Amino acid sequence: MWSEVIPMGGNSRGPIENSLMRRLRIVFMAGMASLFLGLAVFCVGDKKAAEICLEEIGSVGTLDDDLLFQWVGVAVDREQKLYVTDAMDYRLKKIDIQGRLLNSVGGRGRGPGQFLAPRNLVWFDGRLYVSDQYVPGLQVFDEELRYRRRIMFQQPIVDFEVISSDRVVISSLTPNKKPALYFLDGSGEPKGSLVYNDQKVPFMQESVSFCMDRRGDFYLAFSFQNRIEKWTGDGIFLWRRHPLKKVKPVRKRIGGWEVPTEVVLKDIALDSRDRIFVLGGGYSRNRSRDIYVYDSEGKPCGNLLLPEPSHCLYIDSKNNLYARANEGITLKKYRIIETSRQIGGRRGS
Amino acid sequence: MLIGMSLLSTAYGSDVYGKMEFMEGRDQNPDGDDTGELLLFIHSADLMCFNCLEGILEFIRMLPRDIQHARVRGILVPRRSDRDRYSAASPLIQLKKIRGFIAAHQLCFRVVVDSRGIFSSFVSEGSLLVVVDASRGACTGYDFPLSRKEKQEIRSALGLSLGLCGRSVK
């Protein structure tokens, strides 16, 4: 445009006119620049970025009481009553909103209602499903903690979800088999599998924690790899992400096995908006405290930082996040808060 | 007993949490005989290790409750990482955990926490049982799990043999 107004190479107008045009050009350019910058500030300043943070709203278990000694699994029912497994005293415990113990069952053993190493816990439709590291299968209890039955599964259970009263999904450590999630009915009969790797891989390499959304899609967090994946319930791969930067997990030879030495991703959980929360492990900048948040399409939504290391994450139906504190004698409850931030430095909510 | 006492005297006080009754009352054995005492150094990692724990519990189960109460003392030695982190609260955390452990297994002996890791070298390869045999003026250390011969040695040092119903017989 300017080349049309001011002839290049040849000055056909007089000196006063050229000087005026030069000034006008400068003014015009300055005006255009100001207009552009003003628009940019208006547009960018009007953009809001969502920020997620945690607000502690409660805790259960103190140094002085005898409520929790080494809690491992946690679940919440419709009335916000808490259920935890405790590995130190081999018990399943029910706790009310005020943090008072309502009931407790268990004891060390392999019999019905007993535990050797109680682990994960899922509440579903009035029933509690509990895994044990050294006893095969899942034990099922009612909300009064009465033992109901066992769902048999011979392989070690890493993680599990309950889809219906007659369907559970399990991730397991199964050497010499393709890594898969296994679908079982209420009696433990296999009803299918979701193979997430076609290759047989070294032992434990493809161990996963997982969760499932309302559409029946699965989100996998690989325990010993820097990788999360989303799969449909029909076994279609959707996407993969790498929460950490430049991680090379170390393996070590023990006996005849080469095994990983450190957990990369410890757990995965979904909130009611289908946002994915992934708890980092030993390779995270803040060991076992960093949480990587994604939306259901795999887009990063930000990071969270727990005040203390945790071994797991749990999010209830009201978007409260639960994590460990005091090395397992305290259970902390956090509200997940979303704030919007003006890009350009202005903050709002 | 003297050797056992001198070992623990360095740990007595604020670095060791829990009950130390056997330090206060030397005459745990009013008859004055020279039967042995057992010091059980428990590595905290073993509390969460099924196989490790099984060996320790098997040993405890073989001792009558009155013998546990009179002659066994436990020292919980936390892992180094547990001691380094949250140093102010960690001994209290370990004390609480051992409280749960004692209740879960209905143990009849006291356990203290070695919060500074004074005895960490004792448990470098796992929990350790030390038998202080005053009659022979000797200390003997045993790893878990115990062999049959080692169990007999320990019973002998305690000055007892087990009757048919498993109750102490002197």
Image: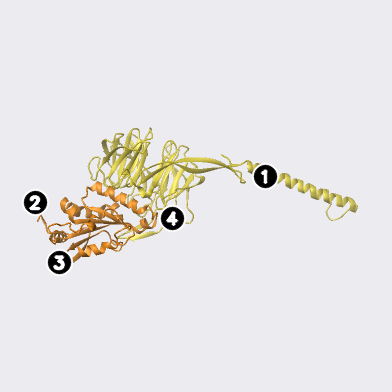
Chain colours: A yellow, B orange
Q: Position of residue A86 (x, y in %)?
A: 31, 45
**Do tag 3 and tag 1 residues touch (Cβ < 8 Å)?**
no
Whether labels 3 and 4 share one chain: no
**Whole-Å distance between the Cαs marked 3 and 2?**
28 Å
Secondary structure under the numbered disc 4 in the rendered image: loop
List the residue tagged with mark 4. Answer: A283
User: Quick one: label 3, few (<14), some, or many (20+) residues within 10 Å?
Assistant: few
Query: Mark 1 sits on what residue?
Result: A40
Residue at coordinates 71% horizontally, 45% vertically from top-left?
A36
The local secondary structure at tag 2 comes to loop
Residue pointed to by mark 3: B136
Question: Circle 2 is placed at which residue position?
Answer: B164
Are tags 2 and 4 found on a single chain? no
Q: Residue at x 22, y 63 (%)?
A: B4
**Contact flag, marks 3 and 2 (Cβ < 8 Å):** no
Q: Quadrant of the C terminus of chain A?
A: top right
Q: Chain of mark 2?
A: B
Q: Are marks 2 and 1 in contact (CB under 8 Å)?
A: no
- Tell me, yes or no, whether the two marked residues, 2 and 4, touch with CB atoms within 8 Å: no
Measured in 3D between alpha carbons, the distance from the residue under mark 2 to the one under mark 1, in whole angstroms, is 91 Å
